[in-house]
């Protein structure tokens, strides 16, 4: 007897239909080319269902087990699976959705729909039998509910949603605690803000782990790489995630290894050769160093290899074994041109080749001419010379060409250039070339153009050409191209999304026709470094609806600060002449990541909403050098993401907000030159990433209370408490904790050689992701009698300035443990005792100021061994005896030793052994007058230079499915 196939249960059918009626069907809600309205096949007579008058012998259309996207158990008829991916669903998924009554559900896929920025309902935890859950690309936002009850999950994908994050105080460890059966965990773009738990090393079923852009920090457990079934591990775009590559076991199943844009460091071990199944290896922009092992040649299945790191040595010749490579990107490695001509022809399958900053010299290697499939070529930031070879005209398959940052002969653009008929993206630089913009209009597919240092001319025939006949650009960067006005060509560019015309000579106002043309399309606008004064037509709001990044810094904008659109994430308008107050509307841009209003004339109070709302998204907040007054807002969000906050050089008063302790990612704090009145904020010691603390020129007072923790301020490398009212002894407990100041560095003088730093030179890198914030910090130092502005504080810089307080007692011997210090200033206190011999251990010291104290005894002769010492001031103390001779001490003049009347020997006139020397307790009128001429050394300002540069997607390269977006953006920076 034939078994009757069960139909779906009435209550489950009713639940599905109620679910259907809670949404609109909109084909724009799904992005897949294969999207279809699956729910239209679901039977829809609710009145009949409510009457329970279902004719079970009717056609199959009444059986929900036969509906599109529904899967039932063949024996029981219970609904066990829903595949509603790309089903054109639009609406909010309610917390009481009938979907959650499907108790037997095992598989649920709601990906690629539009759930209208609603929160994932906590009721999803009722579906305790779920083994697969996919909510990716569906416009969910807010906190992810606890899913610990879903202990049977094998596949979980929450990627590519909108501001999705773990609940506050929900650590990554708690989130995955019960997911012991997980095989696939994909959390791209989920804000986790937590370390990666060690317990993941025990998930022996794990096959795929994708953690991209999750704000992960701490040290990644390397044993995860060694899991027996792991085939894919992607940890990209987690800048604060540290770790090392492990010893890889033989016969590893790994196929994809991607750690780009992380802080992984160390070397690649030869065991990389054990990954014989690897097809994709991406190590771009990590801290990996050392040689590239020859065992890399064992990875014969590789199709994608990205090694844009700071490796040393040459590429091993074993790379010729990688004949399956279709994409090869190497950067910051020295590649000899002769060896390149040997191994490059053997990689005949290459389609995308990047040899960036690999010190290639001479003409473009002829071996490139044999790569017939080449579609992408990046030779930027090398030392190539000569003219562009004619054979390059045969590369008609090229869609991407970057030759910027080389030394090609002028003019750079040859006649045959128009033969590159498929070229879509072009980047060129030259020093002194003159080019007609018409040249680029002859490239029919060109939609993205980056030019640096090429003097452009725009003939009238280009400006007057019909807009229908001109190409539509998506991205255009014209940097230092000698522009004096907005090119009329832009009148036709209503599809332009990325525009940079920085460091030109554009004067006047932003024309209204430009605003009208780009109002809807523009996402990124960089007009920094010009002479603009405002908008032709006065505005109260920035007029671009979809703008994400705006840089108007270093111009002459006047009037009030314009409120941003809600889409804005990067707002940089420093160094202008803006006045008025910061509008509360600024907080409507709730995704703001970067806010720099520094060096204007803005007054009034800091809006409270910046602390309460924007601190949950801001990474950089710079309001320095304005006229802001009142207290600093106290209520910083518990989910504060700020890394750098600079409120220096204002009129702020009151106490420091203790809610700063919520900002656990803080690296730099500068509140210098205000009117703050408080005691030393010892509670900031809990911030484990804090590197720079500047509270100078305020009214901080009292003793610096000792800390019980040996972990407080461990990462601190710059501290400036100068010109306050602290009393008591120097903080020995904290000095003991300053472990980051004990490190010496072979690049310790890097910062001092960069006074002529050029931002955006043609030799600097411009292949940086738009989503990655790059910023450095500025400072001003009075050094060797001259105040100098330094546009960046490099990671090697270490300084202690406790000058101009009321500290008493002796200089602790432990100060000599800070062997990485370059500058130490304890001047203008009431310190007594001798100069510790231990200071001779500060072998990197360049500036030492102990003046205006009551130090006694002799200057230790051992200090003459500090070979980098360029400034030494001990004036106005009670020192005696001979001044050390030799080494650097021979370069110091009288001003270094004034007011120590018992000192003797050069450079002073009184000789040692002279019985007529003046008593150290006496002080002449001349000495007093000389006080005003003494050098007062201090760190005067810390800030930052935004290096937030713009990228543009040019095609899938290898972060996702299976490649990642290769971004192209403006030129970065280089030290001359």
Image (tube, grey):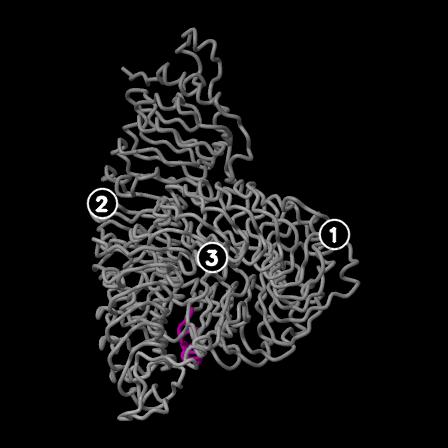
Q: In this view, does 633 lie above or below 69?
A: below
Q: In which quarter of the image is residue 573?
A: bottom right
Q: Mark 3 points at which residue?
A: 648
| Among numbered discs 3 and 1, the one appearing first in the sequence | 1
Query: Could you tell me residue 845's position as x and y percent?
Result: 33, 76
Numbered tag placed on residue 114 in the rendering: none
Asked if marks 3 and 1 touch (Cβ < 8 Å), the reply is: no
Looking at the picture, does residue 181 appear above or below residue 232? above
Which residue is drawn at the image coordinates 25% and 69% (left, top)? Answer: 811
Residue 422 seen in the current view: no
Helix, strand or loop at mark 2: loop
- Figure check: 782 above or below 141: below
Query: Disc number at residue 203?
Result: 2
Verify CB contact (< 8 Å) between mark 3 and mark 2.
no
Between 783 and 231, the residue placed more toward the observer is: 783
User: Which residue range is magenta in the image?
Assistant: 330-345
Count residues near mark 3 (Cα–Cα under 10 Å), then give few for <14, some for 14-19, many for 20+. many
Q: In this view, does 141 lie to the left or right of 201?
A: right
Mark 3 vs mark 2: in front? 3
Q: Marks 3 and 1, Cα distance to the nearest angstrom? A: 51 Å
Crowding around mark 2 (Cα neighbors within 10 Å: few <14, some 14 to 19, many 20+) is many
Question: Gap between marks 3 and 2, in whole Å?
Answer: 48 Å
| Residue 641 in the figure: left or right of residue 863 | right
Q: Which of 33 and 258 is in front in this view?
A: 258
Residue 926 seen in the figure: yes
Residue beneath disc 1: 468
């Amino acid at each position: 007897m034939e078994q009757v196939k069960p139909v779906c249960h009435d209550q489950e059918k009713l639940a599905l239909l109620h679910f259907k009626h809670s949404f609109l069907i909109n084909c724009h809600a799904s992005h897949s080319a294969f999207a279809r309205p699956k729910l239209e096949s679901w039977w829809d007579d609710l009145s009949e269902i409510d009457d329970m008058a279902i004719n079970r012998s009717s056609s199959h259309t009444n059986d929900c087990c036969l509906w599109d996207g529904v899967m039932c158990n063949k024996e029981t008829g219970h609904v066990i699976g829903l595949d509603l991916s790309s089903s054109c669903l639009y609406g909010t998924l309610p917390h009481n959705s009938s979907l959650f009554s499907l108790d037997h559900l095992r598989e649920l896929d709601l990906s690629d729909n539009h759930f209208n920025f609603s929160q994932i309902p906590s009721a999803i935890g009722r579906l305790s039998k779920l083994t697969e859950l996919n909510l990716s690309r569906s416009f969910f936002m807010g906190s992810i509910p606890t899913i610990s009850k879903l202990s049977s999950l094998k596949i979980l994908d929450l990627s590519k949603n909108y501001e999705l994050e773990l609940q506050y105080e929900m650590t990554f460890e708690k989130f995955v605690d019960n997911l012991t059966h997980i095989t696939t965990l994909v959390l791209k773009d989920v804000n986790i803000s937590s370390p990666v738990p060690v317990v993941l090393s025990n998930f022996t079923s794990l096959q795929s782990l994708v953690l991209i852009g999750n704000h992960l920090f701490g040290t990644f457990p390397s044993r995860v790489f060694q899991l027996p079934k792991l085939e894919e591990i992607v940890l990209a775009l987690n800048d604060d995630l540290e770790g090392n590559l492990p010893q890889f076991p033989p016969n590893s199943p790994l196929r994809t290894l991607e750690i780009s844009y992380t802080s992984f460091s160390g070397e690649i071990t030869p065991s990389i050769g054990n990954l014989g199944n690897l097809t994709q290896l991406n190590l771009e922009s990590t801290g990996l160093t050392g040689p590239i092992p020859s065992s890399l040649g064992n990875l014969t299945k590789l199709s994608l290899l990205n090694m844009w790191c700071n490796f040393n040595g040459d590429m091993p010749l074993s790379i010729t074994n990688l004949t399956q490579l279709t994409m090869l990107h190497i950067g910051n490695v020295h590649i000899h041109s002769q060896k390149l001509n040997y191994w490059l022809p053997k990689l005949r399958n290459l389609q995308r080749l990047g040899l960036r900053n690999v010190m290639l010299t001479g003409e473009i290697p002829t071996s490139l001419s044999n790569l017939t499939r080449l579609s992408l070529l990046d030779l930027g930031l090398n030392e190539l010379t000569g003219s562009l070879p004619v054979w390059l005209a045969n590369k008609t398959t090229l869609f991407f060409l970057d030759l910027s940052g080389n030394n090609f002969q002028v003019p750079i653009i040859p006649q045959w250039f128009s033969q590159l008929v498929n070229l879509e993206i072009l980047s060129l630089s030259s020093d002194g070339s003159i080019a007609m913009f018409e040249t680029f209009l002859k490239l029919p597919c060109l939609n993205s153009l980056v030019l640096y240092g090429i003097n452009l001319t725009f003939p009238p025939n280009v400006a007057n050409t019909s807009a229908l006949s001109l190409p539509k650009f998506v991205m255009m960067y014209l940097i230092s191209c000698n522009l004096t006005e907005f090119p009329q060509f832009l009148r036709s560019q209503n599809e332009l999304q990325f525009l940079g015309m920085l460091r030109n000579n554009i004067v006047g106002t932003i024309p209204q026709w430009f605003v009208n043309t780009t109002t809807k399309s523009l996402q990124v606008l960089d007009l920094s470094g010009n002479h603009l004064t405002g908008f032709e037509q006065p505005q109260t709001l920035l007029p671009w609806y979809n703008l994400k990044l705006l840089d108007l810094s270093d111009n002459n904008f006047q009037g009030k600060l314009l409120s941003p659109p809600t889409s804005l994430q990067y707002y940089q308008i420093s160094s202008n002449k803006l006045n008025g107050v910061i509008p509360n509307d600024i907080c409507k841009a709730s995704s703001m990541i970067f806010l720099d209003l520094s060096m204007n004339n803005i007054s009034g109070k800091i809006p409270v909403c910046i602390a309460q709302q924007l601190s949950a998204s801001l990474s950089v907040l710079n309001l320095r050098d304005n006229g802001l007054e009142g207290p600093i807002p106290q209520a910083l969000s518990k989910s504060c993401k700020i890394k750098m906050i600079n409120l220096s050089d204002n009129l702020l008063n009151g106490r420091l907000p203790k809610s700063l302790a919520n900002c656990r990612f803080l690296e730099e704090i500068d509140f210098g030159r205000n009117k703050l009145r408080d005691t030393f904020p010892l509670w900031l010691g809990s911030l484990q990433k804090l590197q720079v603390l500047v509270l100078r020129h305020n009214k901080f007072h009292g003793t610096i209370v000792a800390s019980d923790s040996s972990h407080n301020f461990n990462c601190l490398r710059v501290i400036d408490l100068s010109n306050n009212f602290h009393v008591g002894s120097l903080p020995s407990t904290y000095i003991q904790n300053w472990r980051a100041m004990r490190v010496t560095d072979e690049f310790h003088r890097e910062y001092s050689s960069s006074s002529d730093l050029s931002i955006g030179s043609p030799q600097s890198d411009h292949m940086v992701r738009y989503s990655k914030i790059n910023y450095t910090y500025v400072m001003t130092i009075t050094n060797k009698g001259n105040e100098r502005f330094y546009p960046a504080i490099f990671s090697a810089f270490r300084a202690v300035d406790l000058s101009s307080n009321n500290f008493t007692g002796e200089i602790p011997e432990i100060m000599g443990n800070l062997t990485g210090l370059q500058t130490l200033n304890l001047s203008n206190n009431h310190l007594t005792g001798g100069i510790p011999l231990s200071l001779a251990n500060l072998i990197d010291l360049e500036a030492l100021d102990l003046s205006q104290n009551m130090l006694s005894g002799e200057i230790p002769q051992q200090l003459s061994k500090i070979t980098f010492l360029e400034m030494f001031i001990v004036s106005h103390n009670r020192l005696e005896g001979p001044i050390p001779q030799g080494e650097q001490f021979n370069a110091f003049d009288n001003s270094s030793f004034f007011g120590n009347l018992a000192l003797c020997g050069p450079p002073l006139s009184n000789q040692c052994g002279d019985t007529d020397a003046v008593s150290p307790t006496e002080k002449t009128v001349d000495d007093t007058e000389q006080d005003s001429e003494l050098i007062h050394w201090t760190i005067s300002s810390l800030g930052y230079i935004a290096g937030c540069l713009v990228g543009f997607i040019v095609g899938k390269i290898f972060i996702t499915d299976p490649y990642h977006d290769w971004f192209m953006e403006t030129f970065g920076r280089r030290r001359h």
